[in-house]
Image (cartoon, grey):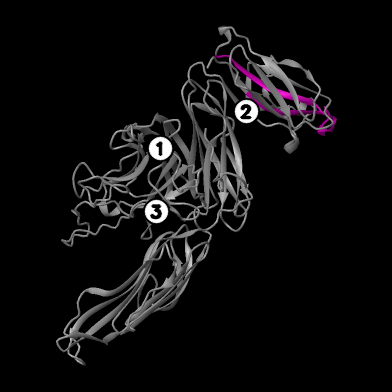
Amino acid sequence: MKHPVALLLFLASPELTAQAGSAIMDGSASFGVSTACSISGIPPLGVGPYHGIWDRYDVAAQPSGGTATWHGWGRTLWNVSAGPTVRIIATGWSTEGFNGSYCGNGLWLYGRGHANFAVTVCLDQAYTFTSSATGEVMGVPTGTSSGTLAAGLHCFTGHSEGNSNFSLDVTLTPTGTGFPTAPNQSVITFPVTCPPNDYAYFLGPLREQPPLDYDLDNDNTPDSWNARPIGYESGTCSTWPLLDEVGAELVLVCVPDPAGPSRGRDHFEARYRTPTSPPEGWQIGDCGYPNAANRWIVEFDDTNSNTVPDAFSKSTWTNYELEHVGGALTRTGCARVFVADFETQQLTAGVVTCQDSTTVIADAVIVPLGTDLGTLTLNGAPITKPGTQSAGDRQAVDDTSATFGIRVDRITAGATPSAPLVARVEVENATAAAASYQLDFFAVNAVLVQQSATLLVPAGSSATFEVTATVAAAGPAAILALVSDAANETYLDAAIFPEPAPNEATTARYGAGCYGATAPELAATPRPLLGTTVDLTTSNLSPATTFATTVATFDSDAAGTDLAAFGMPGCAAHVGLAATVGLGLVTPNGGTAVIPYAIPSSTVFLGANLFLQSIALDPSAGNAAGIATSNAVFLHFGSL
């Protein structure tokens, strides 16, 4: 698995805090004059179109400045700053009248000035605002006011024409209730409602707007199209391209109801397209409830920091069921999740059921990327395609207001039968206080060591938990994790483990040593190819260690057997104890002990599994036995 190199805010350290972010997406400031010629002292009946003096600036490229003016007909001034706190200051004034210029034929130049300002700001979370505004403005009320703006795109404008002026002074402050994201894990925004049906509409690179042919409110006027192009809202609210550097593309599709208009089954699909995929791309997310809120998370690296993803690596689309409560749509707790791993070309789909105010992952499946999601049945029901409902009730709303999030990554590389799987679950807490989160796990083609856990996460930080399972049979495997808080708010993610190639030599680390941070660490390098030698290196040995050995067996114990009966409380054996063989005693050198292990060249051993764990004779271990143990290592002998 490729790991992000330079953009590890969300992955790297629990000491890092997800920062609030904003960005100027676009904007302009301009001054112009509409002119006409008239008899001196007598205003013309009308003025011409905006022409004459016209001075315009791109606010995104030049966030502060002022336009030129000409004969006192007007001017625009602005100063916009974006970051954790946003400040927007803009003023404009304009006048109307003769400027003393002679047109000829007894006529003099008359002008009507106009000053204009507009800026669109992307907010990665909810922001409070305080504002003072006068004149013709939009984005905030006139006068002095305050309130809250949701995450997303917000436009602030000011306009004056003739003898008028405007002023705009807005301060935006983050509330800390945005989804904790990093540049390599981003929330994708998408339209609030599905468009009229009878066509499939791709957002993003396909910009053409289809005809408006739906009238939900029955007012005999086609409904307005309120979609906006999807984009990536990173931790700094940058707009990432929809294409990565290898030509892959993400698009959001509104699929029309095949039964025709007014049947209420238009729904969203997330799709992934590559130069070699079908033109319509592959489904990586779909709607499954008559009323739903969706969250789409995309992961990628940007190792050269050029704001173009190197390659999309993973997509997590979660479809949450909504119900009407007191006139508002709220979550029931039921959800469907689709996790597409673009590196392994696999997709796992899972369903979360909600009963008695609790949620649980009830079922999941792994399918190749490109599978028709409409063919999947989980927990006894189709996972996609909503039933007939009023089209006006169908929703696919942005969900960027969470105060915590989850990410699941594989630690072990692949899924070999009887081998251990280890996934790292990371939960980030964006609140101002430490919080305890409930974790529930589900495995596909694997047996979990534990089904659930509780994780305490410091304020504004993250914490990790390792989930271990044993592969049940040949084929890919997956570990899904669901995180919930005290209010039963839930989020999901998954790690997919591909099936290794036939005869591929693989290794995996699993289990934990004792004691704590001083526990010995066992590693095996290089890969266990037939006829080669693997170095079994035990490091992090204390200076008091006299000898160390590595034991080997053909049986795994992923759950671990408590060694308290042997005078080693807190230690566990992660290899089978019935037929364990020691590979020799070694005196440590500088806290490290190395045992070379020669793998036979005979093909009789092709595909064999070996499980190893190190033991150190350490009087400082703090137990009656004077022994410390390492993690365990799995070797799968191969020829490739």
Task: Estimate how packed mark 1 is, as few (under 14), some (14 to 19) or many (20 or more) residues with alpha carbons within 10 Å.
Answer: few
Residue 105 or residue 126, whichever sits in front: 105
Q: Do the residues labelled 2 and 3 touch (CB within 8 Å)?
A: no
Q: Is residue 17 magenta?
A: no
Give the image quarter of residue 638.
Answer: top right
In the image, what residue type sits under mark 1? Answer: Val
Residue at 59% x, 44% y is 12
Q: Mark 3 points at which residue?
A: 398
Separation of residues labelled 2 and 3 (CA atoms): 39 Å
- In the picture shown, does residue 208 fall above or below 40? above
**Apparent side of residue 525 relative to residue 35 in the rendered image (left or right):** right
Q: Is residue 358 visible?
A: no
Q: Mark 1 points at which residue?
A: 246
Separation of residues labelled 3 and 1 (CA atoms): 28 Å
Residue 509's disc number: 2
- In the picture shown, does residue 356 fall above or below 64? above
Q: Mark 2 or 3 closer to N-term?
A: 3
Where disc 1 sits, the SS reads loop
Q: Is residue 612 magenta?
A: yes
Q: What stretch is highlighted in magenta?
A: 607-633
Q: Are marks 2 and 1 in contact (CB under 8 Å)?
A: no
The mark closer to the camera, 2 or 1, is 1
Q: Do the residues labelled 3 and 1 touch (CB within 8 Å)?
A: no
**Apparent side of residue 29 relative to residue 585 in the rendered image (left or right):** left
In the image, what residue type sits under mark 3? Answer: Asp
Where disc 2 sits, the SS reads strand
- In the picture shown, does residue 78 fall above or below 12? below
The mark closer to the camera, 3 or 1, is 1
Residue 429 is situated, as x and y percent measured from the top left of the image, at 57, 51
